[in-house]
Amino acid sequence: MPIYCDNNTLLFIGDNSVNSYKDYLKKSKLKLMENESNKEDISKKEYYLYNIISSCELILDDLEQGASISDADFNNLGHADVIMLKVQQNVSNQLNPKNIKGGYYPADGSKPILMDE
């Protein structure tokens, strides 16, 4: 799967869709990333995330053109949504401070209202 980029954009295109993006690639001046730079510039985790985002964008484009999603694929989207939400929560929890109790901390400096008590 080819990957195109510039300083602000990273675009994944399915092998079968490259021809339909030729005009866009010329106008946007995105350049094809070499396979070796792909391995050095982004991790495999990031690569999978970019693939997922690219697939979603392609599906949305197809839906705008009049395509539809089958019931089976709609069920698959539901499973994918639950999985991605769980992954997002797991990653986000790594950054949440563990030493702060839940509650309301007033901006005026008055005593906080703690909800964990």
Image (spheres, rainbow, N blue to C red):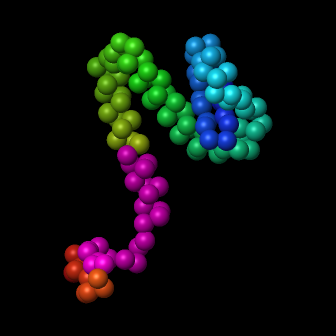
- Please state the horizontal and vertical placement of residue 58, each as a whole percent of the image: 48, 23
Q: Is residue 91 left or right of residue 29?
A: left
In the image, 42 versus 24, the foreground residue is: 24
**Residue 77 in picture, x, y percent from top left:** 35, 30
Q: Which residue appears at 27% of the width and 78% of the height?
A: 106
Q: Is residue 55 left or right of residue 23?
A: left
* Most foreground residue, 44 or 22: 22
Q: Quadrant of residue 18?
A: top right
- Asked if 114 appears above or below 28 in the picture, the reply is below
Q: Position of residue 12 (x, y in %)?
A: 59, 29
Residue 6 lies, with reference to residue 106, above or below; the image says: above
Residue placed most toward the observer, 51 or 23: 23
Q: Quadrant of residue 36?
A: top right
Whether residue 99 appears in magenta in the rendering, the answer is yes
Q: Position of residue 116 (x, y in %)?
A: 24, 76
In the picture shown, does residue 49 fall above or below 13? below
Q: How many numbered marks, from 0 up? A: 0
- The reply, left or right, for residue 13 in relation to residue 113 is right
Query: From this viewpoint, which residue is outermost toward the front?
Result: 27
Q: Nearer the viewer, residue 11 or 23?
A: 23
Q: Quadrant of the N terminus?
A: top right
- 50 part of magenta stretch: no
Quarter containing the C terminus: bottom left
Image quarter of residue 35: top right
Q: Residue at x 42, y 17 (%)?
A: 62
At x 30% / y 85%, what residue is drawn? 109
Q: Which residues are magenta?
A: 85-107
